[in-house]
Amino acid sequence: GTLGKDNFGRDHHGRCFSLWVAGGGAKGGTVVGRTDDYGYNVVKDGVHVHDFHATLLHLLGIDHERLTFKYQGRYFRLTDVHGHVVKGALA
């Protein structure tokens, strides 16, 4: 099939996805967030990609609020202004 023309629930990029993080200060056996029975919608404690990036940078010892990159003459943060470290995922 073609991407974007499939039935409901079979989208290429849904609203949710799962990640595995191991070692390096991540808390083992931890589940953060919850989806509906189809894995399509966040129903509890969703983690935005900016929060995930902030958490990974924290584990690497990098201050996500100071890490910037220049694009088209303006400085941006990888975590935007909304990213926060997910403390519940840390050992």
Image (tube, rainbow, N blue to C red):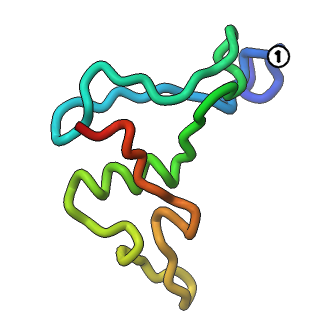
Spot occupied by residue 35 in the image (x, y as percentages of width and height)? 63, 20
- Left or right, residue 65 beside residue 13: left
Spot occupied by residue 83 in the image (x, y as percentages of width and height)? 51, 59
Q: Residue at x 42, y 46 (%)?
A: 86
| Helix, strand or loop under label 1 | loop
How many numbered circles are shown? Answer: 1
Determine the residue located farthest toward the bottom in the rendered image: 73
Q: Residue at x 47, y 72 (%)?
A: 77
Give amino acid for label 1.
Phe
- Left or right, residue 50 beside residue 23: right
Q: Quadrant of the N terminus?
A: top right
Crowd around label 1: few <14 · some 14–19 · many ≥20 (10 Å)? few
Q: Residue at x 36, y 77 (%)?
A: 66
- Left or right, residue 14 beside residue 28: right
Q: Residue at x 16, y 41 (%)?
A: 24
Report the front residue among 48 and 43.
Answer: 43
User: Is 50 drawn above or below residue 29 in the view shown?
Assistant: below
Determine the residue located farthest toward the left in the rendered image: 24
Q: Splitting the image into 4 quarters, where does residue 10 fall? A: top right
Report the front residue among 28 and 67.
Answer: 28
Q: Quadrant of the C terminus?
A: top left
User: Is 55 drawn above or below residue 18 in the view shown?
Assistant: below
Spot occupied by residue 58 in the image (x, y as percentages of width and height)? 29, 57
User: Is 4 drawn above or below residue 70 in the view shown?
Assistant: above
Determine the residue located farthest toward the top in the rendered image: 37
Spot occupied by residue 89 in the image (x, y as percentages of width and height)? 35, 37
In this figure, which residue is indicated by the disc labeled 1?
A: 8
